[in-house]
Image: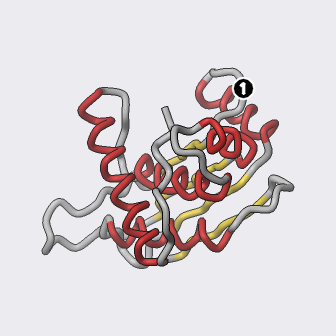
Amino acid sequence: MSIDVNNESGTEVDEQAILDIARYALTRMRIHPLSELSVIVVDADAMEQLHIQWMDLPGPTDVMSFPMDELRPPAKDDEEPPQGLLGDIVLCPEVAEQQGKDAETEHSMDEELQLLTVHGVLHLLGYDHEEPDEKAEMFGLQAAIVDGWRAEKGLTGPSPAPTVS
């Protein structure tokens, strides 16, 4: 899998963890190993501009996803996964840091960015959380992926609760 992480935010983030959890999520979702993903980390001003431009909403947000080839996980275990460009995930560490502090189970900015990376991957794969049943499915899958990755890495303590609305 080709995953590029580009930090343009001026904030120090754990880029390796973002790369690792994105790879773990894509592998777990059975996305073709030759697929490509880009993760861009931006400051609050840049995120606000994207949020206004693409969502017509004021202020910065935590994560935005921009799908390219609209890849989906294979429906059956024996089905060959499609290959292509997944698209871009844009993360904002300033918003992530505040969300981590405000969360039910307080956690670090990097833990929040890991959660948001998985959230962004799921959006690129067609998952959404507009309806209650969609939200339950997406957030359940998001928690399972984050918990699985944390367990694989030997990380202890509770994984971050979803803070993405």
The image shows residue 100 at horizontal and vertical percentages of 62, 44
Q: Residue at x 48, y 31 (%)?
A: 165
User: Outermost residue, front direction?
Assistant: 157
Using residue 81 as the reference point, say whether residue 159 is left or right of it. Answer: right
Q: Residue at x 56, y 39 (%)?
A: 103
Q: Is residue 127 above or below residue 35?
A: above
Front position in the image: 130 or 94? 94
User: Can residue 62 be seen in the rendering of this structure?
Assistant: yes
The image shows residue 60 at horizontal and vertical percentages of 71, 32
Residue type at mark 1? Answer: Gly
Q: Give the quadrant of residue 43.
A: top right
User: Can residue 68 be seen in the rendering of this structure?
Assistant: no
Front position in the image: 22 or 52? 22
Q: Is residue 36 above or below residue 47?
A: below
Front position in the image: 135 or 153? 153
Q: Which residue is mark 1?
A: 59
**Color style of the picture:** secondary structure
The image shows residue 78 at horizontal and vertical percentages of 13, 74
Q: Residue at x 43, y 46 (%)?
A: 123
Front position in the image: 115 or 6? 115
